[in-house]
Image (cartoon, rainbow, N blue to C red):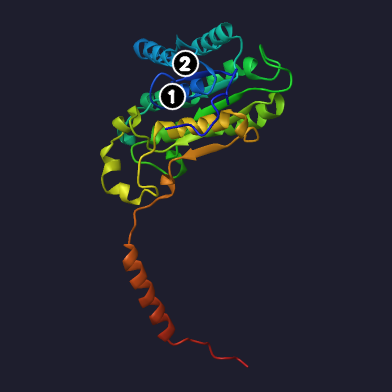
């Protein structure tokens, strides 16, 4: 699909993406690169990491990969520093690393709960913390008047509640809180814009394969507002918008990209039945005697 953005919208920018070697993260890496950015990706799995770098380079994108675990502060610090040493600066940090699995609360160990929070929420804060000196205004390679950009990949699970996702819902609620608080404080002090993206169900991703694709292909699809899965491209376009000057006055917002799914509920009555029921109820209402209490005057 052809991008609606100019190909140089991120020209001269340097982006570091955690979880940028696969799925949504790789698509964001690809689109950032196609739109002018140099890209560094961080990941724990060497094979996937270097395969992604080779793919990006084959597209003519200046790309490099660094092994690291967002749960480890020393890894976060090292990868940020290596990115700046390689490209000369850092403009955009995307926190896309995440962990997930289906489990009922009673079967989830505290350690399993903690692991997802460590990757998603603590990992997000750790990366932001280690990147601050480089993305704030006046940081290495930056001018003294404008800071960089942070994008945190969230979810919609915690907006209501989700079956078998208590750990991820808690983690992503924390990610959203980090986004808002850093937008307030770092936006004020360092001119850094901090925003989030909350994807819905996205086709051809590990998340969909892991969390039950049959759920989307069965009857629940009937009440999805746009009646279809999203694409990784949809999330990447949202990231491009927020990372570019097109979103220069957006700060502290988590953009929901789910086709309206989080708003949806099962349709308890068919549309034709609603029309018939409405007419019947209205007719009864008009014919019913109106009870007026007796006057006391």
Q: Secondary structure at mark 1?
A: helix
Left or right of 121 in this view: 231 = left
**Residue 27 seen:** yes
Residue 35 position within the rendered picture, expressed as x and y whole percent measured from the top left: 53, 23
Report the residue at 34% width, 57% height from top.
Answer: 267
Q: Quick one: quadrant of the C terminus?
A: bottom right
Q: CA distance from mark 2 to mark 1?
A: 9 Å
Of label 2 and label 1, which has the lower sequence position? 1
| 80 w.r.t. 199: above or below | above
Numbered disc total: 2
Q: Nearer the viewer, residue 64 or 2?
A: 2
> How would you rate the neighbour count of disc 1 (Cα within 10 Å): few for under 14, some for 14-19, many for 20 or more?
many
Q: Quick one: quadrant of the N terminus?
A: top left
Quadrant housing residue 262: top left
Q: Nearer the viewer, residue 166 or 50?
A: 50
| 244 w.r.t. 227: above or below | above
Residue that lies at the very extreme toward the bottom in this rendered image: 297
Q: Tell me, yes or no, whether the two marked residues, 2 and 1, touch with CB atoms within 8 Å.
A: yes
Residue position for label 2: 41
Report the residue at 57% width, 28% height from top.
Answer: 243
Report the residue at 53% width, 8% height from top.
Answer: 78
**Residue 69 seen:** no
Left or right of 166 in this view: 79 = right
Quadrant housing residue 241: top right
Left or right of 292 in this view: 163 = left
Residue position for label 1: 25
Q: Nearer the viewer, residue 205 or 126?
A: 205
Report the residue at 47% width, 15% height from top.
Answer: 41
> How would you rate the neighbour count of disc 2 (Cα within 10 Å): few for under 14, some for 14-19, many for 20 or more?
many
Residue that lies at the very extreme toward the right in this rendered image: 144
Q: Secondary structure at mark 2?
A: strand
């Amino acid at each position: 699909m052809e991008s609606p953005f100019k190909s140089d919208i991120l020209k001269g920018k340097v982006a570091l993406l955690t979880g940028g070697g696969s799925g949504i993260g790789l698509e964001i890496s690809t689109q950032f690169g196609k739109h002018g950015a140099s890209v560094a990706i961080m990941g724990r799995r060497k094979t996937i990491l270097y395969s992604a770098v080779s793919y990006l380079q084959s597209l003519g994108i200046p790309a490099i990969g660094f092994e690291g675990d967002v749960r480890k502060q020393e890894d976060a610090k090292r990868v940020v520093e290596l990115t700046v040493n390689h490209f000369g600066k850092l403009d955009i940090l995307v926190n896309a690393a995440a962990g997930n699995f289906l489990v009922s609360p009673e079967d989830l160990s505290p350690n399993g709960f903690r692991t997802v929070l460590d990757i998603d929420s603590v990992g997000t804060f750790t990366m932001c913390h280690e990147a601050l000196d480089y993305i704030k205004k006046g940081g290495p390679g930056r001018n003294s008047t404008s800071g960089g950009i942070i994008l945190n990949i969230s979810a919609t699970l915690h907006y209501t509640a989700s079956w078998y996702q208590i750990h991820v819902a808690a983690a992503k609620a924390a990610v959203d809180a980090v986004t808002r608080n850093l937008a307030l404080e770092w936006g004020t002090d360092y001119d850094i814009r901090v925003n989030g993206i909350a994807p819905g169900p996205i086709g051809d991703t590990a998340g969909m394969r892991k969390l039950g694709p049959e759920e989307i292909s069965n009857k629940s699809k009937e009440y999805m507002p746009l009646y279809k899965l999203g694409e990784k491209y949809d999330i990447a376009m949202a990231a491009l918008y927020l990372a570019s000057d097109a979103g220069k006055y957006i700060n502290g917002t988590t953009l929901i990209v789910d086709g309206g799914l989080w708003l949806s509920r099962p349709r308890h009555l068919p549309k034709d039945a609603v029309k018939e029921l409405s007419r019947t109820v209205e007719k009864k209402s008009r014919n019913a005697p109106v009870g007026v209490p007796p006057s006391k005057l």
